[in-house]
Amino acid sequence: MASEQTTEEQSEQKISKREDWKKKKELEEARKAGTAPAEVDEEGKDINPHIPQYIASAPWYYYGRDGEKLPTLKHQRPQPEKQLSFSDPDKWFKRGVKTGPVATKFRKGACGNCGSMTHKKKDCFERPRKVGAKFTGDKIAPDEHMQPDLAFDYDGKRDRWNGFNPQEYQAVIDEYSKVEMAKRQLKEQKMTEDLLAGKIRRDEDLEEDSMRREGDSDEEDDEDKYADNIDMAGQKFDSKRRITVRNLRIREDTAKYLLNLDPNSAYYDPKTRSMRENPYMNKHLEEVSYAGDNFVRQTGDTVKMAQEQLFAWEASGKGTDVHLQADPTKLELLHKEFKVKKDDYKQNQKGSILERYGGAEHLEAPPKQLLLAQTEDYVEYSRHGTVLKGQEKAVTKSKYEEDVLINNHTAIWGSYWREGRWGYRCCHSFVKMSYCTGEAGKQVARMEMADMEIRTFGDEDEEEEEAPKSLLEQHQEELKKNKKKKKKERQEAEEKEQKDKEKKLKKALKAEEERNQTYQEIMKLDERKRPYNSLAADNQEVTEEELEAFRIKRANYDDPMKNMLGK
C-alpha cells in the first residue's frame, strides 16, 4: 500500500511540474507579445522579455535581499566595488608655499635645517645651514603644501593642459596689447603729420572710396595688420586671395652650392637653401662676395640688437617692463643708463680695492709699447702688403695699389713701352722695382739702342767696343757669379759626402765578412768547446753602413745560386 501511494505522489508532482512549465512558457510568450506585463527585478525596473535566458538567469550563488532567488539583471551591470575612482581633472598639485603667518619658534618634528614641518632634514632642498634652525630658531621656513594624491585615467594622464593656469596667459595678452597700442600711436602720429602737410583728402572723397569698398571685409581694410595689402619681395603674393608662390631665388644670382665645388667645403642645406659657413675658407672676407649666412648675423647692428634683446629679457625677468619692439627708445635709454652705472660701479669698486690694499703705482706705469719698444696689437697683411686685420685696416678699391711711386721714381711702372717691354718713363728702365737714375738712365738707354743698331747694321769685321755697364748690370753679374760659386761648392760637398759613404760602406762590408767567417768557425765547433759568450751580441749602436752591409751579405735561402756566391 505504501509503495502504491508513493508512486501516485510522484506522478502528481510530475504532472504539476509539467503544468507549471507550460504556464511559464505561455507567460513568456505573452510577455514577448506584449499582452502580459513585463517581469520586474528587485529594484523595480522592467526586464526585457527578449533577453536570452543565459543572460537573464543569475548565478546559483547570487541571491536577493531576503535570501531568495529573484529575477534580476544586476549581475550583468558594473559592480560598484570593482569600479575605479579617478580624480577631478580640474585638480592639480599646489605650487609654492602656504600663505599666512610663518612659525617663529622651532616645532618638534620639523626639519632640522630650515624648520619646515612638511619634510625632514634629509629631504630638505634648502642650502645646508652652518647651524640649523633646530638650534638657532631663526629664519623658520614656511610650510609647503601637502600635495594631494591624484589618480587620473588614461586621457587625464596624457592631457597636455593639465595644471595650466589661464591667468599666466595674461602676460602674453598684455604684450600684444602693447604692440597694438604702439601701432595705433604710430598711425595717429602719421595721420597728424599728413594732416599738417595737407596730404589727407576731403571727407567727400573718403565717403566715395568707402562706398566703393563696401563689399570688402573688415580684415582687408584694417591698416593695423602686418602689411596685408603689400606685395612681398621675392614672392608672388596676392593679398586678396591669400595665395603665395615662393620663388626659389633670383635667376641672375649664382646658387650657393656653385660657389665652391669642393665637397669638403661649407655644407649646403637644400631644404632651407642656406649655407652657414664661408665657402671660401682660404680667402679673406674683403676678397669674396659671399661669406656665409653666419657672417650676416655678426655684421652691422645685429650684435647690438642682440645685446639689447638680451638686456630686455634680463630686465623683464627682474620686474622691469620693457620690450624691444614695443618700446625700442625706452630700452635703448635704459641700456645706456645701465652701461654707465655698471662702469661707475666698476670704477668705484676698483678705487675701493686700491684704497684698501694699495698698488695704484703699478697701474700708472707707462705702456708696454714704450717700455719694450714693441706692441701686441695684431695686424694681418696680405701677400700684396695691404692691411687686412688690425687697427690700421684700410679699405681699398682693388688688391693692387694705384698711383704709388717707389724708389725715387716720378712715374709708375708701365708708363714707358719699347720693343715689347714695359718700363718707367722717368728713366727708361725696364727692370721693375729698380731705383730711378733720371736723365743718366735715359742716356744709357739711348747708347744701348745705338749699339744695338750698330751690331745689327754695322760691318761684321769691325771690332765692337763694349759699352759701359750700369751698376744694376754689374750687381746682376755679381749675383750670378755668387750663385754659380755656391752651386759648385754644394756639388763638391755632395761628392765628398758620397765618397765618405762609399768608404764607410767598404769598411762595413769587410767587417761583416770577418764576422760571418768567425760565426761559421764557431758553429763548426762542439757546443762544449765554444768560448764563453762567443755568440753574444755587443751593445753598440748599429750605423747605417753596417745595416746596409748586413743587407748585402745576408744569404737568401730561396736563391738556387746561393751556394755559388762565395766562389
Image: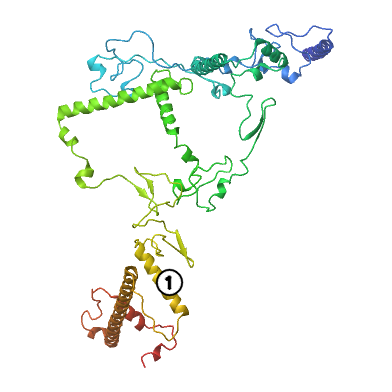
Q: Nearer the viewer, residue 534 or 72?
A: 534
Mark 1 neighbour density, 10 Å: few (under 14) some (14–19) many (20 or more): few
Q: Nearer the viewer, residue 141 or 182?
A: 182
Quarter-of-image position of residue 310: top left
Q: Nearer the viewer, residue 45 or 129?
A: 129
| Residue at point 81%, 10% (across, down) | 31
Is residue 89 visible to us here? no
Quarter-of-image position of residue 557: bottom left
Q: Position of residue 40 (x, y in %)?
A: 73, 8
Q: Position of residue 213 (x, y in %)?
A: 71, 16
Q: Position of residue 506 (x, y in %)?
A: 29, 85
Q: Above or below — where is 294 with respect to 218?
A: below
| Residue at point 34%, 65% (across, down) | 440
Q: From this viewpoint, which residue is outermost toward the bottom?
A: 567
**Which type of secondary structure does the marked residue at label 1 adopt?**
helix
Q: Amino acid at mark 1?
A: Met
In-image side of 259 versus 14 (left or right): left
Indicate the quadrant containing the N terminus: top left, top right, bottom left or bottom right. top right
Q: Position of residue 234 (x, y in %)?
A: 61, 35
Is residue 335 visible to us here? yes
Q: Above or below — where is 183 with respect to 414?
A: above
In-image side of 38 versus 282 (left or right): right
Indicate the quadrant containing the C terminus: top left, top right, bottom left or bottom right. bottom left
| Residue at point 42%, 33% (across, down) | 303
| Residue at point 60%, 24% (across, down) | 227
Q: Nearer the viewer, residue 527 or 93?
A: 93
Q: Above or below — where is 222 with respect to 350?
A: above
In-image side of 99 versus 71 (left or right): left
Count of marks placed on residues: 1
In-image side of 354 versus 57 (left or right): left
Q: Which residue is mark 1?
A: 449
